Amino acid sequence: MAIKKILIEPNKILRQVSQPVDKVNKEIQSLMDDMLETMYSANGIGLAAIQIGIPKNLIVIDLLTKEKKKHPMYFINPKIIKQSSKMSKYDEGCLSLPSLFAEIQRPSECDVEYLNYEGKKKILKATGLLATCIQHEIDHLKGILFIDYLSKLKRDIILKKLSKQKLDQKRLVI
Ligand code: ZN
């Protein structure tokens, strides 16, 4: 396993539409192992392959419950097949938008069809944080970031913060 570099917005690659995986093989599995290790090392709860620059429909999630035990979840070619009309709000963050958070409204429940780590077809009924997280990650596969749901004004404020952060980081490196 290896820790990969996570792409940070603004980056054109993050806006690419990812492609379906044809076959679940060793290569895909080791890629997902790397994604998981990268996610854990960055203290994230979800990561899409495009965030490490690979435009494939792959997601890893681990909500890291209170016991801090690892419960990794792998989603290959995930597709939302049902969404609740009931919405819920969550203060979302993203590994590609470090230190930025914004309240985003999404359907509070969704059914996801996907292939698991072994390539078996599965359907999961997601609720709560898992539903939010899956929808956020599937958005990445379409080149969508959570800030896209904000008004232009809010988005501009948030992006200004991000570029300022980058400048500060540069200063520290010197
Ligand atoms: Zn994200």
Image (cartoon, rainbow, N blue to C red):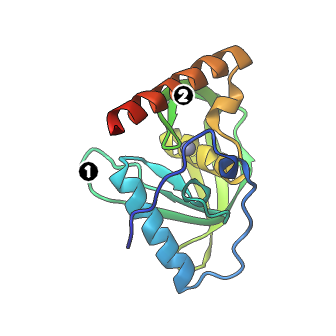
Crowd band around label 1 with a 10 angstrom C-alpha radius: few (<14), some (14–19), many (20+): few
Give the residue type that dot 2 points to. Ser
Q: Position of residue 32 (x, y in %)?
A: 50, 69
Answer above or below: position of 107 versus 14: above
Residue that lies at the very extreme toward the top in this rendered image: 153
Q: Which residue is mark 1?
A: 68
Give the residue type that dot 1 points to. Lys
Q: Which residue is mark 2?
A: 163
Residue displayed at 59% across by 58% down: 124
The quadrant of the picture showing ligand 1 is: top right
Please tell me whether mark 1 sits on a helix, a strand or a loop: loop
Q: Is residue 117 visible?
A: yes
Q: Quadrant of residue 22?
A: bottom right
Q: Position of residue 145 (x, y in %)?
A: 65, 39
Label 1 or label 2, whichever lies nearer to me, is 2
Q: Position of residue 118 (x, y in %)?
A: 53, 80
